[in-house]
Amino acid sequence: MLLDDTAKNDPTTDEIERLRRRISDLEQEKADLELLLVTTTEHADAFERQLTKARDSLESEVTRRTQELAEKNIHLQREIYERTKIEAELRHSRDVAEQASRAKSSFLANMSHELRTPLNAIIGYSEMLQEDIADLGYDELLPDLQRIQGAGKHLLGLINDVLDITKIEAGKMDVHNESFNLSAVIQDVTETVLPIVQHKENMLSVEQHPQDLGEIYADLTKVRQMLLNLLSNAAKFTDKGKIVLSVTRTLDNEAKEWVIFKVSDQGIGMTEEQVGKLFQPFTQADSSTTRKYGGTGLGLAITKRFAEMMGGHIQVTSQLGRGSIFTIRMPTRLNIAK
């Protein structure tokens, strides 16, 4: 009995008991750590597998993208080669076209000069013969001589148109400015075109006010030709209708004065498509128009170029079957000679 009490109170026994509990706790901690290590290792293995999979996927994507870029680069190089080839062909075609255009312009200019000399002689001789025949009393021959003279003047007008357009395209057409009276020009133009107008039973009227006339400073010859072209065109495509030439002046916001010539007719009119190609050289509304009404299709192209050379422009509005309105707007004082 005494021995048991002594054992209970022995410090060594207590120490051993504490060591046992400590060892038990350490063994539990070891077991927990081993479990944690196993779990961590499994997670690490899973993460490594994911990394490997992601790396393989990335490498595959890089390979695919690299292949795509290589294919696109090859395609781009082909496009660059084809485009370079096409550009070279276009430059060559342009050079050939420009050379052909220069040759055409030179040929037309030379031929026009060669034709104008004998034509002027024919016209001059026909005028002389008309005077001589009238004096001799052979009046029955006058209509034939007048037809010869009219045909010669018509052909001379066509040749002059060809010569003008070739000069314009070659950049050799000059503007010669001078002061002149609009009233005199309007009278001259209307008197010149009146026989053409009356031939198709048309009426020609002029709308003008004294304050809109007076002097302007421009190229007299070109202004006269523009108005003749528009009025002749209106007369050609109008039958038993009315043709009106109006002249007005106006100031813009910068106090610059402009003169506006407007020629309206009640002719055959045009579609929008026909208007779109109206000012191209050697072009009329369509082939049937050329066959029916004749002409070279140069008058309006020349008129447009002349208006632009004198700092102006031309516009047209038209309705098929109802007629057309051509409007030229140009400054009253042109200071730069081209």
Image (cartoon, rainbow, N blue to C red):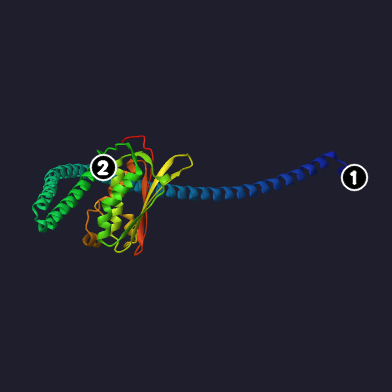
Identified by mark 2, the residue type is Ile
Q: Is residue 288 left or right of residue 17?
A: left
Question: Disc 2 marks which residue?
Answer: 168
Q: Position of residue 8 (x, y in %)?
A: 87, 44
Q: Position of residue 258 (x, y in %)?
A: 41, 43
Q: Position of residue 287 (x, y in %)?
A: 24, 60
What residue appears at the point 31 percent right and 48 percent down from the top-left corner? Answer: 187
Residue found farthest to the top = 336
Q: Quadrant of residue 89?
A: top left
Q: Is residue 255 left or right of residue 177?
A: right
Disc 2 is placed on an element classified as helix
Disc 1 is placed on an element classified as helix
Viewer can see residue 305: no
How packed mark 1 is, by other alpha carbons closer than 10 Å (few <14, some 14-19, many 20 or more), is few
Q: Quadrant of the C terminus?
A: top left
Q: Earlier in the sequence, mark 2 or mark 1?
A: 1
What residue appears at the point 49 percent right and 49 percent down from the top-left corner? Answer: 54
Question: Disc 1 marks which residue?
Answer: 5
Viewer can see residue 142: yes
Identified by mark 1, the residue type is Asp
What residue appears at the point 88 percent right and 44 percent down from the top-left corner? Answer: 3
